[in-house]
Amino acid sequence: MTRLHRMAIAILLMGWACAASGADFRHENKPQNLKALFERVHHEAHVKKDSKQAAALFRALIPDEARAKKALKDNIAPDTLRQILDMHKKFGGSVNEEGAAKIARPAQKEVQVHGATAEEIMRYREGSVAYKEFPGGAKRVAEAALRPGMTFYEVEYLEPGKTAGMKYHLLYWDGKQWAMLGPAWRVLKQ
């Protein structure tokens, strides 16, 4: 094993130890960081039984107007923006300490992250990541509202060996941290 390999392993182990010890999560614009965030939420909720911390980490994904606008087209209709923000207000209130354990079931320890650009989601080509991992409603949101050129992610909690689990929709990097539009197709007018 080379010195570089040993250093890389040491860095990974230090990162794991920090995450396990409860050190503050540091947001980075990398899919593996988004995965680590969701692993951390699961760990806080189901291993440490710290529902307050799990809920706080998850609530930080809920965007305010300024953060939501970073994921949306510049010419987004004010009514569309209001609908999305209203959905988040309702959703944010349900992510409390009692709701933290419902973010994922204890057995759903595996986290998968799937990314696609707004354009890939709009095309929704059969066999693509967008087609396989993003719900059909995401295509409509991409056409109506998503900012071109941005990458969005689906994050899924799975039980080992399972192919379906609890999915969270349209996560994105807002320039400083991770944010989530969620199932915006549920509130957009047809």
Image (cartoon, rainbow, N blue to C red):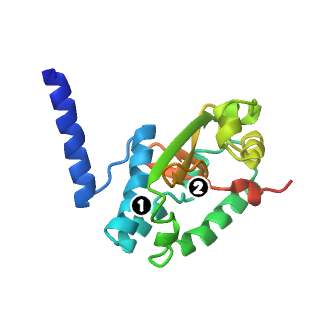
Which residue is label 2 attached to? 165
Quadrant of the image occupied by residue 52: bottom left
Disc 2 residue crowd, few under 14, some 14–19, many 20+, Cα 10 Å: some
Residue 176 in view, yes or no: no
Which of these two is toward me, 123 or 83? 123
Instruction: Residue at 31% x, 68% y: name it.
Output: 48
Examine the rendered structure and indicate whether residue 56 appears above or below residue 81: below
Measure the alpha-carbon separation of dots 1 and 2. 14 Å
- Residue 134 image point, x, y percent: 67, 43
Residue 14 image position (x, y, % from top left): 19, 45
Please report whichever mark, 1 or 2, sits nearer to the chain's N-terminal start: 1
> Can residue 101 be seen by looking at this rendering?
yes
Q: Position of residue 35 (x, y in %)?
A: 44, 46
Residue at the left extreme of this rendering: 3
Q: Residue at x 69, y 31 (%)?
A: 119
Query: Is 168 situated left or right of 185 in this image?
Result: left
Residue wearing tag 1: 42
Q: Position of residue 21 (x, y in %)?
A: 22, 59
Q: Which mark is residue 150?
A: none
